[in-house]
Amino acid sequence: MKRAAAMALLALAVCGCASQSVSIRSLPSEHPAAQNAAAAESAAAFAAAVATANAAAGETGGGAEAAQEAPPPVTPEDAPSMYTYDPWERLNRFTYRFNARFDEALFLPVSNAYRRVPSPIRSGVHNFFGNLSEVDSVINYTLQWRLKLGVRSLGRFVINSTIGIGGLFDVAAKLKLPAAPTGLSTTLAKWGMHPGPYLVIPLLGPSTLRDGLGYLGDYATEYAVDVAKLYRGDASWGLAVVNAVDQRSNISFRYYSTGSPFEYENIRFLYVRKRLIEDEGLRAKVAKKGAKSTTQQENAAAQPAGK
Amino acid sequence: MLFGAAFAWGAEFSEQAITPPQQAITPPPAPGPAAGLADSAALRATVFGTPPQNVAPMPSRVPLTEINIALPWARPVPAVFWFDRKLRVWFSAQDKPAPLAIVISGTGSDGNNSKLSTLRGALYGAGYHVLTMPSPTFPGFIVSASSTGVAGDLMQDGHDLYAAMQQIVAHLPRKVQITEIDVLGYSLGGANAAIVKSIDAHERKLKIHRAVMIDPPVSLFASIGRLDKLFAASIGTGGDAIERLYRRLYAALANLYRASDRVEIDEDFILGAAAAALKTDAEFSAAIALSFRIDLVNVFFAGDLYAGTGVVVDPQHPPRVGDSLEETQRILRSKPFSEYFTKVFAPYYLRQRPNSTPASLIADNRLDIIGGPLRDDPDYYAQANSDDVILNQQELAWLRQTLGSKISVYDHGGHLGNIGERQQVSDMLDMLAGRWTGAAK
């Protein structure tokens, strides 16, 4: 009886939402003062980084030895075509539309509600899941033969799991070991696998065949390692949901906020170009290995990554 | 043979006699240099906006709600625009009786972006309820709130905006107590705001008190002509100009990314890369021209679809959900504003307004159409920059002459490059509150 009543109420609510001509939704508040202070800070940090980089370049006389080791710079002719290989376009568009509707109806409202949770708790949750993913990063950095980064990830995992109380606090970042997660998709890229066709994954969003395989592999790894029995226990579904909500609440993207009929094309274009540029970076790092010490670059990378 | 020729000639002749003489629609003239009054500093300010350390004091917290509203006069929603069924606006309420400031976004922009966030913060901090609305040239507005679907006509857009505002204000939560309504807007939104006030002066449905225009254009088509020139000068013309720009950008980003030793490309990287990659005036110009072109592609597509002008959309077979639009987008990317005017806007409005000519359409889209009220009514205000990309000397002089002491002209800022800056905000608040006594010496 109670259940029937609840169902009826839910049905009414759903119908009501659908037929309403006006809906008012409250969003997380804005904090312009704090936001602006943060922007000022990062602008200052950026200016300082540029200044030191310029000074360093001046001192070493342009770093002639590094130039010898580094691969030739990417030229405009090297840029991939503006067209994107998308043989499954109809299916992808359907999935994109499904994702947009799912996001609007459920995912976004839930993650907006979640953002009302006090921020120390949210960052605890975020750190917790971030810490769990370090396991996958360690494995993949090893597979990529980037051992220095692998050791860094391992160090982060050990420090945060112990001093950081099970990963709730990112102590390692304060010890100048910022997070740098990686995954199987990057490993596959490192091994020379082409991204393949564009693929929109249900609920997850834009991807390519390679990155989709990467997601699957990452999940399989986590499932196989099963840290603290979190991935195979009874609570694993609940955890997966919290993880998803945490991820969503940290992404400011909103489907169709551009209002544009070309949004599918634009997102596809940007996503694939971003991944291709990241691949270029990977290739360059192979060639650059053993060249100049990376401490300076790592410091530069560490600057804004600390979230 | 001769007969045939005569027949053909006759047919041509009689056809001419039946259809009204087709005026050759020429693109609107764009006097002056490509970048209006802008110099190097102005181009940079236009791209980067106000540096955070120069931003006016902001409140620590601004509540925000999103209102989605279906408007009864909207035209049937084309399949490809299924997601734009309702008009979406953003509202921040004070918990006490307060004046309502309605802010209209600039060309092609939504009702929630960083410029509007800044203005919302400043206005909310000064005690206003704040309602931010998309530009009438934003696709979401064109689909959900336009009565024509062909955006860019000042009066038509003004009427649509005014009607939408009435509906929204009527549906605000009951507990919100409004003491008076003021409108403001930036760029094209500034012109829209003044037009809305002038319409309200006759209809008195919202009893709008004051209007503030931030960096408005004076002649819509002269301004967009300047942007076309800017595009041609910095990016080039023809189908492969965009491709060349893309290749340059790709290479620049890839090299910066390699050098940065970052693991992932994120927002910080993009912002940093923009700062590092943009060096010359031509590059800054290209960035400005490209951002306007991306907006134009949407306006052009929607206009062509609604007006049935058939430039890229076959009126008989409009695209369906799931159809690829890549080719359409590629074609539209190489089309300038002037082509939107000659192939969509003018044909549509010439048909709607029997006595109009292309020249009259251009004249109707100048702020002169409300020159009288701008001059005589003490409740219209403006802010402008003397190095604005979209203005020329005569237009700036016209603004100064017409608005007299009700305008504040700043030396620097380019187009919108000083929104949120301390002086701009304090002057804007003075204007809205009726405290403005002329530019401080």
Image (spheres, helix red, strand yellow):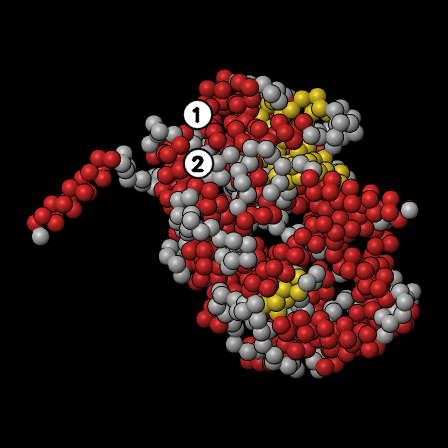
Identified at 66% across, 65% down, the residue is A201
Identified at 92% across, 65% down, the residue is A165
Which residue position is annotated with label 2? B220
Which residue position is annotated with label 1? B369
Q: Is residue B5 left or right of residue B362?
A: left
**Three-letter amino acid code of the residue under disc 1:** Ile
Q: Looking at the rendering, in which quadrant would you find the C terminus of chain A?
A: bottom right
**Three-letter amino acid code of the residue under disc 2:** Leu
Classed neighbour count for the residue bearing mark 2: other residues with Cα under 10 Å, few (<14), some (14–19), many (≥20) = many
Chain containing mark 2: B
- Residue B308 appears in the figure: yes
Chain containing mark 1: B
Q: Give x and y (percent) for residue B121.
A: 70, 37
Q: Give x and y (percent) for residue A54.
A: 60, 63
Label 2 residue SS: helix
Closer to us: B287 or B37: B287
Q: In this view, does A248 lie to the left or right of A170?
A: left
Identified at 57% across, 43% down, the residue is B140
Against A216, residue B84 (above or below) is above
- Residue B37 appears in the figure: no
Q: Give x and y (percent) for residue B64.
A: 73, 39
